[in-house]
Image: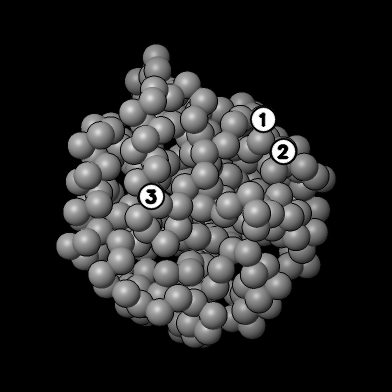
Amino acid sequence: MVLGTGDCRGCAVIDVNQPSAARVYDYFLGGTHNFAVDRALAEQIAAMTPNIAETMRSNRLFLRRAVRYLAGQGIRQFLDIGSGIPTAGNVHEIVREAAPGASVVYVDIDPVAVEHSRDILAGVERTGVICADVRDVDRLLTESEELGLIDFDEPVAVLLAGVLHFVPDADGPASVVAALRDAVTTGSYLLISHATADGQPPEVIEAQKLSGRTATEIVLRTGAEITAYFDGFDLVEPGLVFIPRWRPDPGDEADGHPERVGAYAGVGIKN
């Protein structure tokens, strides 16, 4: 059975003339759930930073590696916040292979991404979709429980892959993470990947500014700032590192310049 999917209360009105970060990401990953305006912005970004698609794919590969790791640690509940569009190889598919019977709740603020997600997940057991803002922690936690898929008395993996850099400093990203930390029990995990200016050439930083044309502008933060979000969690090895360095799969070629992806990644456990 497919459990409830919630609604889009509080989410932005769909505007197909405004590019969406979720749909631009989908385009870079080779997805089909995007519009002309998204593709135009993606191509403009790619013209300034030719390795941008590699960066997007690297983030997705990190998410897959980390979810497999978390499933191997016994996690059977996954809350994917800022999930975008669950294209091929996303969390529920990895979970289904690594931990049959585990549950996944996707959360995104983009109503188009949410509707695409619901279409993709129709008939997929133990999955649900919520249209909510990461900054509205109380609501997304409540709706996750209402779906019948997340029990916060049991360990849960909170996935914040490529989402906190869309939360401006004025909106208190640290307080958002703290609220999520306080909501989960001991043995739960926090996953973060986050864009950074560390080690980046000026043209990459300029390209990141193009995100201001979407409704969700990217805020680049330092490794120290991102590490601080893990307050209350113990980082698992190898700690916070550039994405390609986080537990690469056997046989992966060593990347001599991992900073080129322009993003850090880390996973922590609440003890």
Whether label 1 touches label 2, CB < 8 Å: yes
Query: 77 or 143, which lies in front?
Result: 143
The residue that disc 2 covers is 228
First of labels 3, 2 by sequence position: 3
The image quarter containing residue 117 is bottom left
The residue indicated by pointer 3 is 211
- 138 or 146: which is nearer to us? 138
Residue neighbourhood size for the residue with mark 3, other residues' Cα within 10 Å, grouped as few (<14), some (14–19), many (≥20): many
Q: Where 244 falls versus 84 (above or below)?
A: above
The amino acid type found where label 3 is placed reads: Ser
Q: Picture coordinates of residue 59 (x, y %)? A: 42, 41
Residue at (30% x, 55% y) in the render: 24
Question: What's under tag 2, amino acid-wise?
Answer: Ala
Give the distance between the C-alpha atoms of the residues marked 3 and 2, in whole angstroms.
24 Å
Name above or below for residue 92 compared with residue 42. Answer: below
Q: Residues within 10 Å of mark 1 (few under 14, many from 20)?
A: few
Residue 88 in sight: no
The residue drawn where x is 30% and y is 61% is 19
Disc 3 element: helix
Q: Is residue 63 left or right of residue 201?
A: right
- Of pointers 1 and 3, the one earlier in the residue sequence: 3
**Image quadrant in which you'd find residue 203:** top left
Residue 224 shows which numbered tag? 1
